[in-house]
Amino acid sequence: MYEPDLVLLDIMLPRKDGWQVCREIREISTKPIIMITAKSETFDKVLGLELGADDFLVKPIDIKELIARIKAVLRRCSAREIPIDNEVVKFDNIEISRQKYELKLRGKSVDVPPKELELLYFLAYNFNRVFSRDQLLDKVWGFDYLGDSRTVDVHVKRLREKLDGVSDKWLLKTVWGVGYKFEVLQ
């Protein structure tokens, strides 16, 4: 199977639109996506970025700008590639095992409810990407979850209490008006 380093994705495609293709790619991959379109509305750009695109270009495209953006996106993404094996995510002073449902902070196991661990694992696995409450509910709780979307806020608050002071190299960050992310600091 061929695995590209980056996907250039046009929004206007013959069978499926680029929005749907972007969603499908994000279901299976964190490879960088640059969306290309003739649509220049702010709404379209925001939608593309919220769906998981890493950059957005409006046609007509200057080839030099395209090459520069490809290099910039690849540079950002290669800097964040951390080997993830056996469903374990590791950063400075934190280890999250989805397989064992175990959270270790500074090498010591910490009790954490399953949904908190799943939320933390999902955010850490997809570090530096922002997810809205609805996206997190869909990915962590499941699309059929009927509860209040504020449950995400409660889980993040509890996680922050557990993670407080563990490391200065990453943090669980609120992106106001958008959602949350596990931010790895350079």
Image: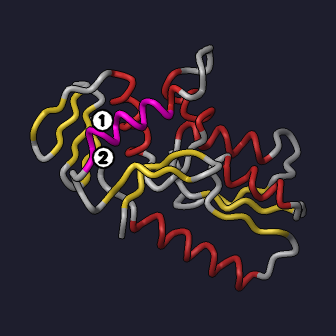
Q: Residue at x 65, y 49 (%)?
A: 177
Q: Is residue 96 magenta?
A: no
Q: Residues within 10 Å of mark 1 (few under 14, many from 20)?
A: few
Please state, as top left, top right, bottom left or bottom right, where the C terminus lies in the image.
Answer: bottom left
Residue designated by label 1:
87
Q: Distance of mark 1 from mark 2, alpha carbons?
A: 7 Å
- Residue 24 image position (x, y, % from top left): 65, 38
Residue 72 falls left or right of residue 93 = right
Q: Residues within 10 Å of mark 2 (few under 14, many from 20)?
A: few
State which quadrant residue 7 falls in.
bottom right
Q: Residue at x 21, y 51 (%)?
A: 166
Give the amino acid type for the residue marked by disc 2 in the picture. Ile
Q: Residue at x 30, y 29 (%)?
A: 98
In the rendered view, tell whether residue 162 sits above or below residue 118. below
- Residue 168 image position (x, y, % from top left): 27, 61
Residue extending farthest to the left is 108
Number of labelled discs? 2
Closer to us: 117 or 39: 117
- Residue 55 image position (x, y, % from top left): 66, 64
Q: Secondary structure at mark 1?
A: loop
Discs 1, 2 touching: Cβ within 8 Å = yes
Q: Secondary structure at mark 2?
A: loop
- Residue 97 image position (x, y, % from top left): 25, 33
Q: Which color scheme did the rendering employ for the protein? A: secondary structure
Highlighted range, magenta:
153-164
Residue 31 falls left or right of residue 156 = right
In the rendered view, tell whether residue 49 sits above or below residue 121. below
Closer to us: 136 or 35: 136
State which quadrant residue 34 falls in.
bottom right
In this rendering, does residue 85 appear at all?
no
Residue designated by label 2:
84
